[in-house]
Amino acid sequence: YEISECLVGSEMCIRDSNVSIERLIRSANFRYKAYMEKIDYTIKRNLDRNQLERLASLDFIKDGQNVFITGSSGTGKSYIASAIGYEACKNGVRTLYSNASKLMGQLKMAKKKGTIESEMKKIEKCSLLILDDLFLIGPDVRERSILMEIIEDRHGLKSIIITSQLPVESWYDAIGDPVSYTHLRAHETLANL
């Protein structure tokens, strides 16, 4: 009798855990499903299996580090960032995935409407923020201001994964603020595809 109670209790814990993971994945708003174990290392694109396995351990999140995944179009940057994000969700880490241009546009509109604070709090609640295709379209002055605020709020506390076609060395001009650029780069891991 005690064994069956234990099994039922264990099954309920697993079910609750799965529901929690599914909720984290849904609220992360991923563009598509991506899994670390499905990454194809046979394609020539500078993938370092050891580096990706270290990233999948999620230690960078515990340390408040940022991950930059750069490379040309079609190299799998978004997939890899999403796979790391899925891994984070499976480990109970609140994550938000967003196309960077769309997010900046939404936040700019929220600023006009006077709802920017509540939108920024949603972002702040996430231990991992994934900004996909940052600098694909150069940010305008208001978007730069919002981006700087996000970087400053997360500096050394919460992680950002950024995918970009623009090499990291060119980000200084795109960000336009030396302090934010330094904070963004202070705790980084770079994967160049």
Image: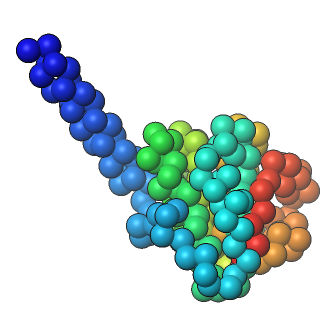
Residue placed at 28% from the left, 35% from the top? 14
Query: Where residue 76 sits in the image (x, y, percent)?
Result: 59, 77
With 107 as the anchor, is 66 left or right in this view?
A: right
Placement of the N terminus among the 4 image quadrants: top left
Closer to the camera in the image, 78 or 140: 78
Q: Nearer the viewer, residue 106 or 27?
A: 27
Quadrant of the rendered structure where residue 155 is?
A: top right
Q: Residue furthest top?
A: 2
**Please, is residue 89 above or below residue 156 in the view?**
below
Q: Position of residue 165 (x, y in %)?
A: 72, 79
- Residue, x 68% and y 85% (percent of image)? 44
Q: Is residue 44 visible?
A: yes
Residue 184, x across and y down, in percent: 80, 53
Q: Is residue 165 left or right of residue 79?
A: right
Locate residue 190: give its quadrant: bottom right
Q: Residue at x 20, y 20 (%)?
A: 6
- 34 or 166, nearer to the observer: 34
Which residue lies at the image location 46% right of the left edge and 48% below the top edge? 89
User: Can the viewer see residue 113 in this picture?
Assistant: no
Left or right of 156: which side holds 44? left
Is 84 positioned to the left or the right of 21 in the image?
A: right
Compared to 165, does 152 lie above or below? above
Q: Against 122, is 108 above or below? A: below
Indicate the quadrant where residue 74 lies.
bottom right
Query: Eyeballing the image, is 56 above or below 103?
Result: above
